[in-house]
Amino acid sequence: MNVQLHAPAWAPETSFAGRLEVALETVPRSPNGFLASLSASDFELIRPHLRTVELAADSVLVETDEMLKRTYMPHKGVISLVVKLARGERVQVAMVGRDSIYGAFAPLVEGPVLNNATVLVPGVASTVELEPLRAAAGQSPTLRARLIRHGLAVYAQIQQTAGCNAAHTVESRLARCLLHTRDLSGSNKIVLTQEAMAQMIGARRNSVSLVAHTLQQANFIHYSRGHIEITNADGLIKTACECYAAVKAQYAGLLNCQEVGR
C-alpha cells in the first residue's frame, strides 16, 4: 500500500523514525462529509485517533480479499472501488470522495474486502485505524448509525452503477462519471488516462477516446493528454444519464445532509 503519512498544515510538526504521523488536536469539520456529520461527542471519540495521509495517484489502498486496516475520509481526492475480473479486466463500481468514508462497514463487520480500492484522483484524507473506530462505534449508537448510512450510500451507488453499465450509452456514462468525479474532488480540472476512464465506465479505450472527442467537440470539456477540464457543466449534465441525479438523490436521502456537488 503506497500511502504517505504526513503532518497537515494546521498541525504541529512531529517526527517519528521513518515517517511523519500526527495526532490532530483539531481537525476541520468541513473538508469531509462524514466528519462534518458527526455530533461533537462522536467526533471526540475518534479525534485522538485521527491521522492525515496523502493519497498519491494510483496508490492501491487495499486489494480484494485483504483485511482493511484503516478507513479513509478524503478532504481532496477520489478513491475508486474496482472489481477485477478473471481475464484481467477492471471495472469501477463506485467512488468515494469528500462526501463520505471508505470502509464504513469494516468497523462493524469483520471480513476481507470485496474489491480493490485505488486512488483515482490524488489528494489528502483523514484516516482512522479500525480498532479504535470499532471501539468508538461500540460506545455510540449514533456513530454506528452514521457508519451504516454511509456504507449503504456506497452500496446504493454500486447498485446504480450495475444498472447504468448495462443500460446506458458510453457517452452518457462518461458524462456521469466526469460530473461525479468533479463533485467528489471539488475541481473542474481532472487528470484521467484513457485507461482510467475506460475502467470507470466499463468500456474499451477506443470507445472512450471517441466519446471524449465528441464531448470536446460539443465544448462540454477540454481534453488533452489525460488532462480534462469541464468547461460546460450544464451541457454535460444534459448528456449524462439519469444515474447522475439518482446517485445524488440516494446520498442526500441516506445521509440527510447537504449535497457536496456544485
Image: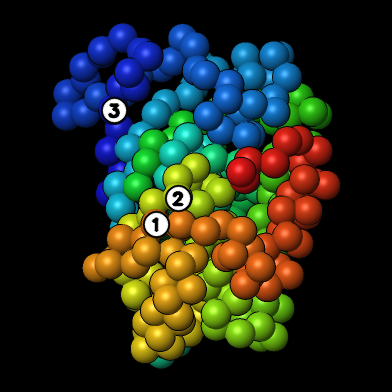
The reply to whether residue 159 is in sight is no
Residue 214: image tag: none
Q: Could you tell whether 214 is left or right of 96 in the image?
A: left
Q: Residues within 10 Å of mark 1 (few under 14, many from 20)?
A: many
The reply to whether residue 249 is in sight is yes
Q: Is residue 93 above or below residue 234?
A: below
**Residue at coordinates 61% horizontally, 59% vertically from top-left?**
234
57 or 109, which lies in front?
Answer: 57
Residue for badge 3: 6
Residue for badge 1: 229
Q: Residues within 10 Å of mark 2 (few under 14, many from 20)?
A: some
Q: Position of residue 126 (x, y in %)?
A: 46, 31
Q: Is residue 37 above or below residue 228?
A: above
For the residues labelled 1 and 3, the Cα–Cα distance comes to: 29 Å
* Mark 1 and mark 2 residues within 8 Å of each other at the beta carbon: yes
Q: Give SS at disc 3.
A: loop
Residue for badge 2: 188
